[in-house]
Image (tube, rainbow, N blue to C red):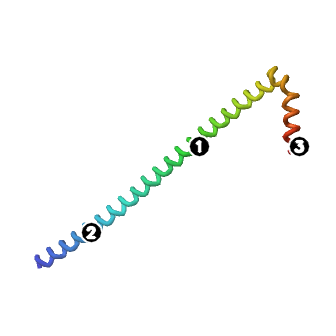
Amino acid sequence: MLRTFGDILLKHGLALTQQHAALSAALEREETLRARAEAERAAEQTLRAKAEAERDVEQAMRGQAEVERDAIRRSTFWRLTAPLRATINSFKGRR
């Protein structure tokens, strides 16, 4: 009887060990998936921030280009050469 009782305990212990291993593996897979998802979210946030910074730089460059264009158009040289540019543009339009 003691031998049978020992066999039962051994089988029960083995079953518990297997269940514990299966649960540990499932938990580890879940933690890995969560970590991967978190890394993907962080990468996405980084890409968004980079895109936003690039848009800001582009807007600043456009603004600077507009300021420079306006300064050229207000210049004396631009006003003095306006008739020449108009003549050249009229010849371009005839082609």
Q: Residue at x 45, y 50 (%)?
A: 39
Mark 1–mark 2 Cα distance, whole angstroms, equals 49 Å
Circle 3 is placed at which residue position?
A: 94
- Which numbered disc flags the more N-terminal residue, 1 or 2? 2
Amino acid at the residue labelled 2: Gln
Mark 1–mark 3 Cα distance, whole angstroms, equals 44 Å
Please say if 6 is above or below 76. below
Left or right of 34 on screen, residue 8: left
- Which numbered disc flags the more N-terminal residue, 2 or 3? 2
Secondary structure of the residue carrying tag 2 is: helix
Left or right of 63 on screen, residue 38: left
Q: Nearer the viewer, residue 92 or 6?
A: 92
Mark toward the viewer: 2 or 3: 3
| Residue 48 placement (x, y as % from top left) | 57, 45
Q: Nearer the viewer, residue 18 or 13?
A: 18
Q: Residue at x 21, y 69 (%)?
A: 13
Instruction: Check residue 51 in the rendering and tell me which mark sits there, or answer none.
Output: 1
Circle 2 is placed at which residue position?
A: 18
Amino acid at the residue labelled 3: Arg
Label 3: how many Cα within 10 Å (few below 14, some 14–19, many 20+): few
Amino acid at the residue labelled 1: Ala
**Extreme residue in the top direction:** 76
Secondary structure of the residue carrying tag 3 is: helix
| Residue 8 placement (x, y as % from top left) | 19, 75
The C terminus lies in quadrant: top right
Please say if 20 is above or below 84. below
